[in-house]
Amino acid sequence: MNKASVAAVAFGLFALAGCGSGDQDRLNMADNEVVEDLNALSDQAANVAAEAEALQNQAANLEQEAADNAAGPEVPADENIAGM
């Protein structure tokens, strides 16, 4: 091999070595985006769980109210109010 070939190969190896470090930065950025997406999904899941719990409480209250209404008036005076 002559000196030009050796120099070209060496330059190519140095160029490839320099390009490899940029990929790590892109991977770190991609990892950060994934972490941010997972955090957002986690927050959404927590909000949905809290909303579901509130809806369960509301349903339980409505069921109790319906059961109370189905029992009829508590005292005879309430019967007159219900008839109005």
Image: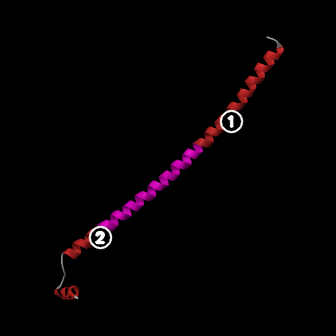
Give the image location of residue 45, x and y in percent: 45, 54
Q: Is residue 46 left or right of residue 74?
A: right
Return the x and y of residue 82 as percentages of the image width and height.
22, 85
Q: Where 84 falls versus 49 (above or below)?
A: below
**C-alpha distance separating marks 2 and 1:** 60 Å
Q: Which amino acid does the dot numbered 1 rest on? A: Gly
Residue located at (41% from left, 62% from top) = 51
**Residues drawn in magenta:** 31-60
Give residue 2's position: percent from left, percent from top: 82, 12
Q: Is residue 56 magenta?
A: yes
Task: Please identify the quarter of the rendering in which residue 65 is found.
Answer: bottom left
Dot 2 amino acid type: Leu
Q: Residue furthest top?
A: 1
Residue 14 is labelled as none
Vertical position of residue 18 compared to residue 36: above or below: above
Q: Earlier in the sequence, mark 2 or mark 1?
A: 1
Q: Which residue is mark 1?
A: 22
User: Which residue does the image show at 54% across and 49% down from the upper left?
Assistant: 37
Q: Which residue is mark 2?
A: 62
In the rendered view, tell whether residue 57 sits above or below residue 81.
above
Task: Tell me which corner region of the image, top left, top right, bottom left or bottom right, holds residue 12.
Answer: top right
Image spot of residue 76 (x, y percent): 16, 86
Residue 77 falls inside the magenta stretch: no
Q: Secondary structure at mark 2?
A: helix
